[in-house]
Each structure stands twice: as structure tokens, then as C-alpha cells.
Image: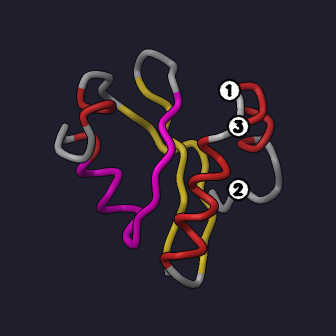
Amino acid sequence: MCYVYILECADKTLYTGWTMNLEHRLKVHNQGKASKYTRARLPVKLVYAEKFSNKIKAQKREYQIKQLSREDKLKLMGSKKNIL
């Protein structure tokens, strides 16, 4: 399985990514080893995730979410799609 996720950073900004292991990826983000963006905004918390059957679908969805405004991402986070 693959996942698209949204993290809320300590400064209240949002970060979107994809992974094959959601639990491990969150741990690595909070260790400051996953991305330059989140490294400077620790700690982060997982606020949204969607599950996909393959990498290509997850990457396409990640791109779609990254094109959304902050307001639209917040609406998405409150939707029933969220697997959390």
C-alpha cells in the first residue's frame, strides 16, 4: 500500500508527501531526516492520509493536493476521505 499524507508543522504550515510506510515516514520526519522543509519546522503531526494501491496513484494524488490552496487542504482534512 501507498499513502498520501498531510503533516501540520509546529509553525502551523502544512506539508504534503507520499510514502509506502506511513508510521516510519512520520518518525523520520520528526527526527529531522525526511525533508528540508519539515526539518526546520519540528515537531510535525500527521493530520490527514489517504491509502492507494500503488505508487503512481499516490504520486498523482500528492500532486493534486499540492495544487490546492491552504483553505481547500483544510476542507479536505475534515472530509470523510481521511483514513485517520
- Expressed as whole percent of the image width and height from the top left, the position of residue 39 reads 24, 31
- Expressed as whole percent of the image width and height from the top left, the position of residue 38 reads 32, 32
Residue mark closest to the camera, 1 vs 3: 3
- The residue where tag 2 is placed is 82
The tag earlier along the polypeptide, 2 or 3, is 3
Amino acid at dot 3: Leu
Task: Tell me the crowding category of disc 3: few under 14, some 14 to 19, or many 20 or more residues within 10 angstroms, Cα based.
Answer: few
Q: Is residue 6 magenta?
A: no
Q: Residue at x 53, y 53 (%)?
A: 5
Question: What's the distance in space between the residues labelled 2 and 3, CA to CA?
Answer: 16 Å
- The residue where tag 1 is placed is 70
Residue mark closest to the camera, 2 vs 3: 3
Question: What's the distance in space between the residues labelled 1 and 3, CA to CA?
Answer: 7 Å
Label 3: element kind:
loop
The tag earlier along the polypeptide, 1 or 2, is 1
- Expressed as whole percent of the image width and height from the top left, the position of residue 84 reads 62, 56
Label 2: element kind:
loop
Q: Which mark is residue 68?
A: 3
Amino acid at dot 1: Arg
Front residue (pair 57, 33): 57
- Expressed as whole percent of the image width and height from the top left, the position of residue 77 reads 71, 42
Above or below residue 49? Residue 69 is above
Question: What's the distance in space between the residues labelled 1 and 2, CA to CA?
Answer: 16 Å
Amino acid at dot 2: Asn
Above or below residue 16? Residue 82 is below
Task: Tell me the crowding category of disc 2: few under 14, some 14 to 19, or many 20 or more residues within 10 angstroms, Cα based.
Answer: some
Stretch of the chain drawn in magenta: 14-28
Q: Residue at x 59, y 42 (%)?
A: 66
- The answer to whether marks 1 and 3 mark residues whose Cβ atoms lie closer than 8 Å is yes
Residue mark closest to the camera, 1 vs 2: 1
Q: Residue at x 43, y 27 (%)?
A: 9
Q: Is residue 15 magenta?
A: yes
